Amino acid sequence: MEQKKVPVMLHRALFGSLERFIGILIENYAGKFPFWISPLQTVVIPVSEEFDDYAIEVCKKIKEVGISSITDLKKHNLNYKIRDHSLAKIPLLLICGKKEVDSNTVTIRRLDSNKQENMELKLFLKTFSALNKAPSN
């Protein structure tokens, strides 16, 4: 006859705690995360198919400095794309058209702002790669 063994249960709330923490962050920021913690930080939007190559090049350079980015090459109009990504709470939308291609710049549209600013690509990369770090105390 086998001797009875006392069952041992190990409890670790590692993932449960992480899930609660993420839930609290989402609730606190209402989904509008600060730039440095946002899962998708920028979306590069070409004005038309004519500027797709420049948008792809911009996105590549953004990724090289460690900023999360995608290029929206869908066949929708510009207003639809801006509205779609604004509702997804993407912190920065980068618009690329003829003016931007000619001057090697991007037009930046921030979440919850109707203002747009034009910035040289090198300056954008320098400025926002610095903002892509967690704040220190």
Image: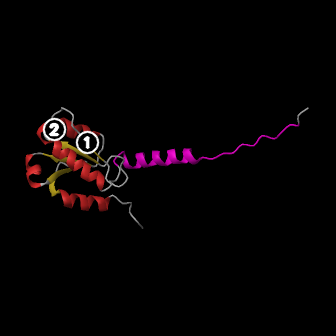
Residue at image point 41% right, 49% down: 28
Residue 85 counted in the magenta span:
no
Indicate the position of residue 36 as horizontal and vertical percent values: 35, 55
Q: Residue flagged by tag 1: what amino acid is it?
A: Ser
Question: Would residue 116 be seen by someone viewing this image from the given angle?
Answer: no
Range drawn in magenta: 3-32
Q: Which mark is residue 133?
A: none
Residue at 19% over, 45% down? 55
Query: What percent of the width, then of the height, locates residue 12?
Result: 63, 47
30 versus 84 height, above or below? below
56 relative to 132 in the view: left or right: left
For residue 88, side relative to residue 116 (left or right):
right
- Residue type at tag 2: Leu
Q: Residue at x 25, y 62 (%)?
A: 126
Q: Can you tell which of label 1 and label 2 is closer to the viewer?
A: 2
Q: Position of residue 18 (x, y in %)?
A: 51, 48
- Asked which quadrant contains residue 105, the reply is bottom left
Q: Secondary structure at mark 1?
A: helix
Residue that lies at the very extreme toward the right in this rendered image: 1
Task: Identify the residue position indicated by label 1 in the image.
Answer: 86
Where is mark 2, residue-wise? 78
